Amino acid sequence: MSPRPAGGRAQAGGLDDLAVRIRRCRICAERPEGPPLPHEPRPVFQLSPTVRLAICSQAPGNRAHIAGKPFFDPSGVRLRAWLGLDEATFYDAAKVAIVPMGFCFPGYDRHGGDLPPRRECVRTWHDTLFAALPQLSLRLCIGKYSLSYHLPETRRQSLTETVRDWRAILERTAPCPVIALPHPSWRNNGWLAKNPWFEAELLPHLRARVAAALG
């Protein structure tokens, strides 16, 4: 992570301006890489200059798109249980950043599943955004697309291999450590059943880390 810049007020103003520009972004509709976004863009994220915890997710689902609120679905309920956070704390932008790899709901594929996050978002915004958050003390990376950005060395690994390697990843990513997580969707119920160590070993440590970051 970059060193903390001098002048917290300027940093806050810069981040606020960046958030305004992201909310107005229409790149995936007007200058797309591939097919344009199939609906009106609506970037969904949560950000402030005081956060120390960042949830680095994939892309908002349709319910989050409609509500304009990240993780506004059963996946969010499970994620908050994993983190040991109530809804009020989770949606407190002064405490928790939620930064998806694609800011807009990408639409559905022909099988009814969510399409991958739009590539335009990362290439346009993410380096600048995370450089403006030097105070972060913990990044929670959900799913392969998030991990490919924050931990590019894991791209050739399976998600299971990366999540299982959580202790070593915490060590090598300090001072802003990363914890890799599967997506909290119901579609991963089978993965959770096959990997009981996730709930038995990783989740208690995750909750302690989240509490320390917020404390």
Image (cartoon, rainbow, N blue to C red):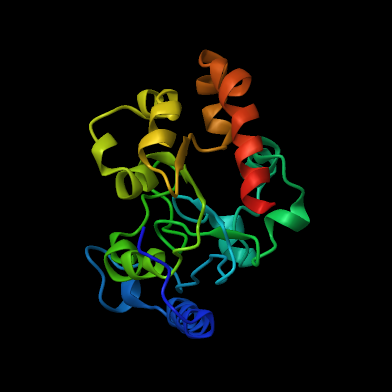
Residue under the point 65% across and 28% down: 204
Left or right: 162, with 192 as reference point = left
Q: Which quarter of the image is occupied by the N terminus?
A: bottom left
> Relative to the observer, which residue lies in front, 149 or 63?
149
State which quadrant residue 107 falls in.
bottom left
Name which residue lies at 51% across and 14% down: 194
Left/right placement of residue 180 relative to residue 46 reads: left
In the displayed structure, does residue 86 sit left or right of residue 129?
right
Does residue 37 appear left or right of residue 201 in this picture?
left
Q: Position of residue 86 (x, y in %)?
A: 77, 48
| Residue under the point 26% across and 65% down | 123
Where residue 69 appears, as percent x and y from the top left, is 63, 63
Residue 18, position in %: x, y? 44, 79
Q: Nearer the viewer, residue 172 or 111?
A: 172
39, above or below 77, in the image: below
Q: Name the residue rendered at 35%, 37% in the picture.
A: 172
The spot of residue 104 in percent (x, y) is 45, 64
In the foreground, 206 or 112: 206
